[in-house]
Image (cartoon, grey):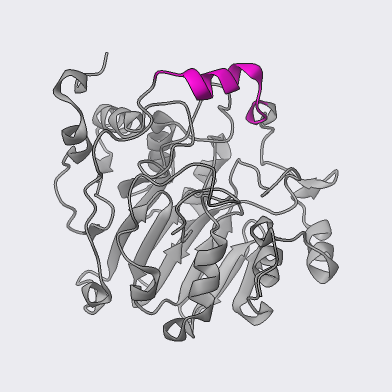
Amino acid sequence: MIRPFASLGSSPSGDRLQRILRSPNYRDGAFQNPVPGGLDAMWPTIATLQRQFFGKERRRPPAPIPIVPLARKDFESSPASGLRVTWLGHATTLIEIDGFRVLVDPVWCDRASPSQLIGPERFHAPPIALQDLPALDVVVLTHDHYDHLDMDAVRTLASSATQDRMQFVTALGVGAHLESWGITSRRITELDWTDTAHVGELRIIAAPARHYSGRMLERNQTLWASWVIAGPRHRVFHSGDTGFFAGISLVGEKYGPFHLSMIKVGAYGEDWPDIHLNPEEAVRVHESIGGGLLLPIHWGTFNLAFHSWDEPVDRLVAAAERAANTQLVVPRPGQCIEPSSPPSLTTWWRQLMPAQASQRP
């Protein structure tokens, strides 16, 4: 039986804690960012609480988001090019790469919160039921925040008879949460920055990111990362959660260029510029790492910031147009994309807006 408040997870201890203490990225009792980043504004203040409750931004879609419903049969055929990605909402992506299937940040919960009674609520249903997912090789968990690590989803996947070969790869320390939820240690690989996990011919590499961690008040006792997923023929990049820092270009120099980059564009704010990319910074990251096709993530599923729900993607389209070499795709949740032959850009989200609100100032 799962214990009360189990979604809070567990703190690293024993051999796991000793490994953390040996990490060059753990100092002064916490994991550190590659460059200093201000996190004080993430604590609620009177000003942020006032904006949260009385801000005038349109933070939810005015009409249902048009998902593409999926079933297991939709994945019976391998992608012709060897690489296919399906955005399932927020940071959740299913990547089919050179014969392997990798699911990143599976979040199926109704609320990105330790409680399913309160907290940010989904804008749309997941395009596919957990039990209908095809057999997976790897689940990558970028870090331990609730909108990226869903206890019920990982427990369901770990217990599924159709997912018996699946491994979990995550950042250093996050395995403590997984083990507290009944997932055996033999299925968990934890990586420090620049470490590599091998699943057959597939390489999964944890790269630096500028963010923070924690599922309650205690912060930065587990690591966060961006991720490189490399098969024999294709390479893709998933940003996880990160703010901009000049050193992120080293990811492209060391592991790129990439056929696809999945980069967060949403949940930014002027009060926390260091730990969440804005859309213009997402384009900078994409270009600096040699990102190939850019697929925006971390928008359109939860209300986690003060901006309008569709502002991130509108700003992204404008930034991509200014950057002549940026190839952009904005799929609907559940739409399968092969980067070798991406569909034309359609601004489907603008069709949800009332006519009088369709033009932004």
Inspect the magenta stretch and tell me whether residue 175 lies in it. Answer: no
Q: Residue, x 48% and y 57% (percent of image)?
A: 255
Where is the C terminus found, in terms of image quarters? top left
Say if residue 98 shows up in the picture: no
Examine the image and state in which quarter residue 222 appears: bottom right
Lateral position of residue 275 relative to residue 353, left or right: right
Residue 96 vs 21, above or below: the answer is below
SS assignment for the magenta stretch, majority: helix
Q: Is residue 197 left or right of residue 282?
A: right
- Residue drawn at point x = 66 percent, y = 47 percent: 213
Up-down: is 135 above or below 227? below
Q: Is residue 175 visible?
A: yes
Q: Is 96 located above or below residue 62 in the figure?
A: below
Horizontal side of 258 relative to 48 (left or right) equals left
All told, the count of numbered labels is 0
Name of the residue lying farthest toward the top: 361
Instruction: Determine the residue positioned at 63% across, 71% down.
Output: 189
User: In the image shown, does 293 or 48 lie closer to the viewer?
Assistant: 48
Where residue 269 appears, x then y in whole percent? 51, 26
Q: In which image quadrant can residue 353 be found?
A: top left
Stretch of the chain drawn in magenta:
41-56
Percent across and percent down for residue 320 are 28, 33
- Looking at the picture, tell me which residue is in the foreground, 356 or 330: 356
Q: Is residue 50 magenta?
A: yes
Question: Where the N terminus falls, by quadrant?
Answer: bottom right
